[in-house]
């Protein structure tokens, strides 16, 4: 990616589901290494935005560039450089945690040693041989974090990454999905105060439109209140 | 692509071995159908009624086809319900690998089903001995199964995107597989005829092989679009 290219760039991006516009006219730029937190009430379009950046949804309007490549045409060039953690863990319930991670490791051409390293990092080594169906939601979320960062992606797209995690698990996954390593991050949060911590930019969405776009440090409680009103 | 296909196939077979959702249902359907035919045909002049030739080939193949529909219906369910599609789409791999892996998995399921279903058919319904025709019958089974696997994978990938999957699979697959049933039945009939010197019916086998090739090319051309948002 040329240095001058932003890691994420949207110009008038939009997305519909049938006749309903889920995202309208979203424009922003995020430099490499920066963190964008996306805030907004339920149904505001946060997940749609993340899935669009992950190449899982095609934009229906505007321009979307990720890691210097235009989507959806250059989608193949950025797959494998993106780590996506959505609402679904993307793990097969019948397979064990280790089998799931090994499956994704094979798809991403990652060495199997990395799987053990991550199982240790998220504290799941003792339950690695249990089927995912037998794990608690918090444990599944820890495995999902491990899956998302398995291939050491440059861009992390995190939809409520700390959902279902206890404080110990939060501390375990924090180094994997935190600001370290120069990663660019786009994350959604229902906790505006916590979400803004560690973010460079804040995007507020309301009914699919941009209601707030500012430096995270400049966002005021009144703006947050207005967003969720 | 070989490594990706191997990873996907290993996952498919592991899930089927653990859930036993497809193959046992397909086997049970076949055996039950042959048992129903066995009792439905009743006795003729005090002797057990048996079938041969065209009728035997028709009963064998129609039953196998309906059993295949059960497997086709479930082919993408785990991927659809557990986010496997997204996990695959996020990986930097050739999407044709999924088509190949799913078709091989379905072909494997069909072969396993036939290991039980064909002897059961021979035992319950067939007049002539199955043994003499078996080598030629295995060739017909394999060529027809490839066609069912390719068409089935294509239909399953299309139907899984719709709400009425259970309805769409038979509605789409049965008409598309009529040529396979015709070819397979005609190729099988002489092998199952009373007192027949079994020889491989080359014309019908060639037709089946041509159909396999045609649909393999169609599936290769359109499969990417089926996975697109």
Image (cartoon, coloured by chain):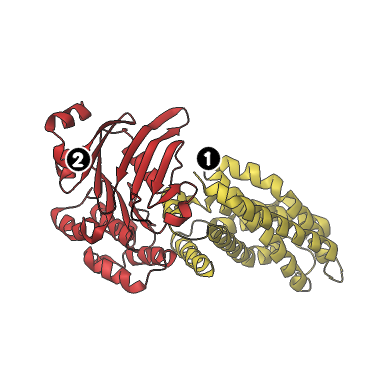
Chain colours: A red, B yellow
Q: Which residue is mark 2?
A: A215
Q: Which residue is mark 1?
A: B162
Residue B21 spot, x, y in % from top left: 49, 56
Q: Which mark is residue B170?
A: none
Identify which residue, A43 or B57, lies in the foreground.
A43
Quadrant of the frame with the C terminus of chain A: top left
Question: Disc 2 vs disc 1: Cβ atoms closer than 8 Å?
Answer: no
Residue A227 spot, x, y in % from top left: 22, 29
Identify which residue, A164 or A59, lies in the foreground.
A59
Residue A48 spot, x, y in % from top left: 37, 39
- The structure residue drawn at horizontal position 40% and vertical position 36%, both measured from the top left corner, is A13
Eye-nearest disc, 2 or 1 = 2
- Residue density around tag 1, few if under 14, some if 14–19, many if 20 or more, within 10 Å: few
Q: Is residue B5 above or below residue A69?
A: below
Identify which residue, B172 or B94, lies in the foreground.
B94
- The structure residue drawn at horizontal position 51% and vertical position 38%, both measured from the top left corner, is B163
Query: What's the distance in space between the residues labelled 2 and 1, CA to CA?
Result: 42 Å
Based on the displayed image, in which of its 4 quarters is residue A189 positioned? top left
Residue A166 spot, x, y in % from top left: 16, 53
* A189 left or right, relative to B136: left
The kind of secondary structure element at disc 2 is: strand
Q: Is residue A50 visible?
A: yes
Identify which residue, B40 or B149, lies in the foreground.
B149
Q: Is residue A30 above or below residue B4?
A: above
Quadrant of the frame with the N terminus of chain A: bottom left
The kind of secondary structure element at disc 1 is: loop
């Amino acid at each position: 990616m040329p240095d001058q290219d932003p890691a994420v760039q949207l110009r008038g991006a939009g997305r519909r589901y049938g006749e309903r516009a889920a995202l309208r006219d979203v424009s922003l730029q995020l430099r490499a290494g920066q963190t964008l937190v996306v805030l907004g009430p339920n149904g505001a379009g946060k997940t749609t935005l993340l899935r669009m950046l992950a190449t899982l949804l095609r934009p229906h309007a505007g321009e979307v560039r990720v890691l210097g490549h235009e989507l959806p045409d250059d989608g193949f060039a950025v797959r494998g450089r993106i780590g996506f953690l959505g609402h679904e863990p993307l793990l097969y319930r019948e397979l064990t945690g280790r089998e799931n991670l090994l499956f994704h490791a094979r798809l991403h051409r990652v060495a199997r040693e990395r799987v053990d390293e991550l199982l240790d990092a998220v504290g799941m080594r003792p339950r690695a041989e249990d089927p995912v169906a037998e794990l608690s939601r918090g444990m599944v979320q820890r495995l999902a974090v491990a899956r998302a960062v398995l291939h050491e992606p440059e861009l992390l797209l995190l939809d409520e990454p700390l959902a279902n995690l206890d404080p110990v698990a939060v501390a375990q996954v924090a180094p994997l999905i935190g600001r370290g390593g120069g990663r660019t991050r786009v994350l959604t949060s229902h906790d505006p105060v916590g979400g803004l911590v560690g973010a460079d930019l804040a995007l507020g969405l309301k009914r699919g439109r941009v209601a707030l776009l500012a430096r995270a440090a400049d966002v005021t409680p009144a703006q947050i209140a207005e967003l969720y009103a | 692509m070989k490594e990706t296909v191997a990873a996907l196939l290993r996952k498919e077979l592991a899930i089927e071995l653990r859930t036993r959702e497809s193959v046992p249902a397909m086997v049970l359907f076949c055996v039950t159908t042959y048992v129903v035919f066995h009792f439905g045909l009743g006795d003729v002049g005090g002797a057990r009624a048996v079938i041969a030739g065209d009728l035997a080939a028709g009963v064998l193949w129609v039953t196998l086809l309906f059993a295949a529909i059960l497997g086709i219906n479930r082919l993408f369910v785990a991927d659809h319900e557990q986010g496997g599609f997204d996990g695959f789409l996020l990986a930097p791999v050739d999407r044709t690998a999924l088509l190949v892996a799913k078709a091989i998995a379905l072909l494997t399921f069909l072969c396993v089903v036939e290991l039980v279903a064909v002897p059961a058919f021979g035992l319950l319904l067939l007049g002539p001995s199955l043994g003499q025709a078996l080598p030629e019958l295995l060739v017909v089974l394999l060529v027809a199964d490839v066609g069912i696997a390719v068409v089935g994978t294509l239909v399953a990938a299309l139907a899984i995107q719709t709400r009425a999957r259970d309805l769409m699979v038979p509605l789409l697959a049965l008409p598309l597989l009529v040529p396979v049933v015709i070819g397979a039945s005609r190729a099988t009939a002489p092998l199952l005829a009373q007192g027949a010197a079994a020889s491989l019916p080359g014309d019908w086998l060639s037709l089946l092989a041509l159909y396999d090739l045609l649909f393999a090319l169609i599936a290769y051309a359109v499969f990417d679009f089926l996975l697109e948002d």
